[in-house]
Image (cartoon, helix red, strand yellow):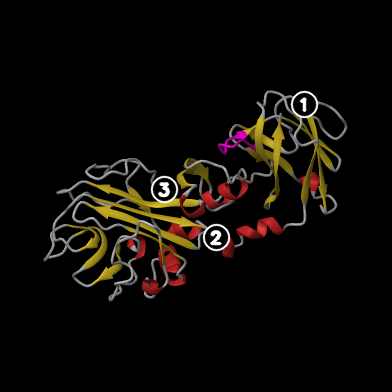
Amino acid sequence: MKNVNGTRFKGIAPIIFAAMILTFCQVTGLKAQVPRNCSEIHFYNPVAASGVYTIDPDGNGPLSPFSCQCDMTTDGGGWTLVLNYNHLENTNPPLKVFNDNLPLQGQTSLGIDESNTKYWGHAGTALMTDLPFDEVRFYGYTTDHDRMIDFKTSHAGTISYFKTGVGSTDGISTNFTPFADHSAFLPAAINMTVSNMGDYAMTAYPLWTGSTYHWYLGGEDPLCTRRWEVDNYPCTTPSTFHQIWVRQNISLGINGLKQNKIEINISPNPFSNVAMLTFANAKPGQLEQSHINIYNLLGKEVYPVVIHNTGSFTIEKGLLVPGIYYIQLVDASGILSSQKMIIN
């Protein structure tokens, strides 16, 4: 790298960066600019594949970044997995509540016991409060019947309930969108509501038709010793698969990132060796407090030589292979602008 006076530094610019391993970290002590959810990853890299990514739901808060499962294809993509239980019949292992991490996705076929693994558990209300989302997707099926639960909802009561554990899903029965393979009676058949279940808002009857159709995980009562239910009330323990995904849609402001006035201009684009980044509508001094992040199509950050000039940046191809990249202008407040960059 090179400072504004033209002196080249190898490695890390001491004024702007303290470390460069997976992300650029700032000397001020702020955490690296890591996406808060899978929706942000998808927003800045629309061709990112489904898989495991690193997110930081509370931004510059105390929570450390961690890995999560992203679905980048269903209904346009951008979904973050917050509940995953692949349960084996005739077992009743305890549920697991995550407060500083999220479950990953392992197997999706029935008849598998994933208890006590990284694929088993759900987010507690503390983590759900930090995670920005305004859509929820329920997905589940069982060996007890052929129906499948697969729908999304933006029902405000459900969003609030899953974040805080206070309230209920009352009203979701008329506020949901089924996906093509949805064949369950729930949530349309709901006729009862359970409220204020705290960290178990997503597991203890969020969808419930009395003594008929339930969404319920890992419970016991005098009538049914073990309860693992997907649109049924079997009073047995069939193999079941429950998932809940969340997504941040435009109503929470992710679209507002597109509305910022700073525009990144790359010239030439595509380029073979060197390109110049200039900016339209940046406020005086704003670029001096900013830096550049660059990601490949898999969402992995890459590190070409970036020279911070006065009012612009120069990018040298270096060891980058030809292809499409996504470039971000970032400061302490977050991502200021994003643009596609092509190297040939």
Q: Nearer the viewer, residue 166 or 182?
A: 182
Q: Where's the C terminus, which quadrant?
A: top right
Residue 47 falls left or right of residue 116: right
Would residue 330 be visible to someone looking at this image? no
Q: State the separation of the CA atoms marked 2 and 3.
A: 20 Å
Q: Which residue is mark 1?
A: 273
- The numbered mark at residue 249 is 2
Query: Callout 3 environment at 10 Å: few (<14), some (14 to 19), or many (20+)?
Result: many
Look at the image and give the residue range highlighted in magenta.
295-301
Q: Secondary structure at mark 3?
A: loop
Amino acid found under the numbered disc labelled 2: Asn
Q: Residue at x 51, y 42 (%)?
A: 54
> Which image quadrant is residue 141 in?
bottom left
Is residue 53 positioned above or below 76 on the image? above
Residue 39 lies, in percent from the top left, at 54, 52
Q: Which residue is mark 3?
A: 102
Residue 308 falls left or right of residue 137: right
Amino acid found under the numbered disc labelled 3: Leu
Q: Where's the N terminus, which quadrant?
A: top right
Q: Is label 2 or label 3 in front?
A: 2
Mark sitting earlier along the chain (2/3): 3
Residue 173 lies, in percent from the top left, at 36, 72
> Which image quadrant is residue 303 in?
top right
